Image (spheres, rainbow, N blue to C red):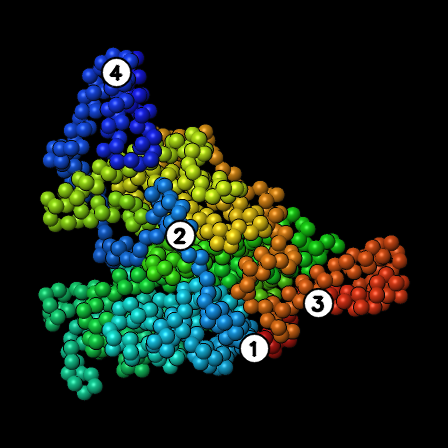
Amino acid sequence: MSLFIQFIAILAAIWVFIYRRDRMHVILPVALIALGVATLFTEFHWLPWLTLFLIVLLYFQDNLRAKLISRPLFSFFKKALPPMNQTELEAIEAGDVWWEAELFQGDPEWEKMFAYPAPALNEAEQSFLDNETQTLCQLIDDWKIVHERGDLSPEAWAYIKEHKFLGMIIPEEYGGLGFSALAHSSVVTTLATRSSSAAVDVMVPNSLGPAELLMKYGTQEQRDHYLPKLASGEEIPCFALTSPEAGSDAGALIDRGVVCKGEHNGEQVLGLSLTWNKRYITLAPVATVLGLAFKMFDPDHLLGDKEELGITVALIPTDHPGVVTGRRHNPMGMAFMNGPTQGENVFIPLDWIVGGAEYAGKGWQMLVTCLSEGRGISLPALSSATAALCYRYTGAYSKIRKQFNLEISDFEGVEEALARIAGYTYLLESMRIMTAGAVDLHVKPSVVSAIAKYHMTELSRVIVRNAMDVHGGRGLILGPRNYLAHCYISTPIAITVEGANILTRNLIIFGQGAIRCHPFIFREMQAAQSTDNEASLREFDSLIFRHIGYTISNIVRTLSLGLTAGLITKSPVPGPTARYYRQITRMSSALALVSDAAMLLLGGRLKRRERLSARLGDVLSQLYMSCTVLKYYEDHQRPAADLAYLQWNLENSLYECQLALNGFFENLANRPVAWILKRIVFPFGNAYRPPSDDLGEELVEPMLESNELRSRLTRNVFVGQQADAPGFIIENAFDLLAETRETRYTIRKAVKAGVIEPSPDHAAVAAAAVKKKVCTRAEADAYLAAELARHEAISVDDFSSSEFISGG
């Protein structure tokens, strides 16, 4: 019994220090003192003293520790590492880790998050959004773009070029606008609420394309030549990566560039003979300069000893002999420019490689780094646009549309759909702003951008589906009045491009996140791949014991937080949001523990157990999403109207974390370990529930009337002032009905009381109301205008046979 007491005394003494992640030089003296005290009050036992002695010996004797433990572990670790090709390695190394690393490591330092500045537009950016962007939206008619012209109007294209919409990210010194990532995102969001086709045409040159590559990697000569022309629209860029045999797997590229000599501008120069076949290339049909990714080979060793140099990127004028462009794809019926490009044995000089010959073979790392920025801006902007549009117009429509003499917003089934739209719209706007803010901090957020791309496009699909359900037939009939259909139809495009969502969730978020965010794994991998065995063993020895301590700390922390429901950890803020910070810390600790367990148990096999790793990626994603909501709430000075939105999202995210972890435990093949992990993470069973119906009802209320929250969440939605603009039709009816609420109620009471004869003719009802002195003439006129606006808002388009055949 006394032996047991001594071990418990040691454990109790060091538990707090392990929880705090103190170093061994702090923990060992505490353990020694605890054992000494316990021995004084019980009796001497050699086992605990011997155990403590061996731990101390191994801690201080590096050579002995390396020989007995580290070297065998090092050999095992090398064998357990999953095979990784150069493309995968470059993708993992590309980009930076940011706030997601804090969440992955189990003990987020909230002060870091609060220290990130609140993203905001400067005066010039806000002016551009309020003026030039609004003017461009007025020049755009999405119905005509998609169903009549198949393109933007010449006037719209001219305006885009004149006002440098294609050069938003290009610095002012090269003639561009030099906008922040947030401004770029906001402009694309606004354009997308008017026309997704127009938004994509503007978005792509400012995302993954020649301009960004040139700014980061181009030679000075290349920048001076291309950037001013790209900024002014004189040059229209496209970037060609995807080919029939290589989509998400860039390592499978068969497009080739062979180093050879050839003629250029009448001279014999060293260059490349290129052959390619690309598809799905946005702006390719109208591009004047083609960014091309290919595998580069040097079989005659004209550049050096290496024959296969790797993926390389070059810029090629599309009027260069042998370049084929012009044909178009039809992406879900949308009209943005997209098509294939080919070339066979096209000769280009080496100095057309982005960055020059010294960047030969470095193309994939260049692309992944740039993709992590563009993916964090462009597709989140489109998703946020869909969400904001659905929030504004679906809420309004549910007040305009009546069924069974009730506004459809009064039905709980409709309210349930509206709650999802409301909650997820708040989340998407929070994610858009915080993720763009990371780019503006000069972070290349590879993992965060993957989280944003996957979850924002998936949630926009949920939002637009719910919006369509609420609109019913009004959303089904195509025509100039329909503001939802093109959002709904084009949703799969965002799901698929820049890393298909299945790939992003199952391979990238956790696969890259686990390696880059873990405090030790990436450096252990680098040590294992080093050719200097002794130096790498010393590095591994240092890392692996810190890793073991980290894992033990995660066990202690996760169990402690589980037993206390997170109450023992501090919240950085007081008030109603404090509990959510504690719960995020609890789930962060659980993720750190379960991730380590998964990597230890499965090793390289975890790469192929995609459903398991995807669930852990879901936990990381939900934690990041929760933090964006908390940051948005804090950056806007904790508005009272936002609290229900924050609570709904945090409760939903914590519940999703629980579902993902339980799914992991249920499907882990090692059942004893799964049972232990579940009891450590959830010692008293499930801890979280989905948001309540009452909370959902609170979310819907701000959607149904004009207020600051509604205006803030939908400030980037283009409404328009033209009488035939689809957004204006809905907003006009919404406003007029709100203004005449009391008059309509008074008239409805009079009809019900028999004072006014019921009639479907609103003009007759209005006239009778004046005659019976139920309301004034001015009130009756306003009532009639509101009812006519209601009728206009619920109306759909129809066409003659000839119009139908010609596309309207």
Please give the name of the residue rendered at 44% of the width and 31% of the height, measured from the top-left corner. 564
Which amino acid does the dot numbered 1 rest on?
Ser
Q: Quadrant of residue 755?
A: bottom right
- Location of residue 235 (image quadrant): bottom left
- Which residue corresponds to mark 3? 789
Q: CA distance from mark 3 to mark 2?
A: 48 Å
Q: Earlier in the sequence, mark 3 or mark 1?
A: 3
Q: Secondary structure at mark 3?
A: helix
Are discs 4 and 3 less than 8 Å apart at CB? no
Is there any visible trace of residue 32 in the rendered image?
Answer: yes
- First reached walking from the N terminus: tag 1 or tag 2: 2
Q: Which image quadrant for residue 501?
A: bottom left
Q: Which quadrant of the figure contains the N terminus?
A: top left
Q: Which residue is mark 2?
A: 115
Q: Amino acid at mark 3?
A: Ala
Q: Which residue is mark 4?
A: 39
Distance between the Cα atoms at labels 4 and 3? 87 Å
Q: Residues within 10 Å of mark 3 (few under 14, many from 20)?
A: many
Residue 154 percent location from the top left of the image: 48, 82
Number of the front mark, 4 or 1: 4
Residue flagged by tag 2: what amino acid is it?
A: Ala
Q: Quick one: SS at disc 4?
A: helix
**What's the CA distance linking mark 1 and mark 2?**
57 Å
Where residue 791 appears, as percent x and y from the top left, is 71, 66
Residue closest to the eye, 518 or 465 = 518
Q: Residues within 10 Å of mark 4 (few under 14, many from 20)?
A: some
Q: CA distance from mark 3 to mark 1?
A: 29 Å
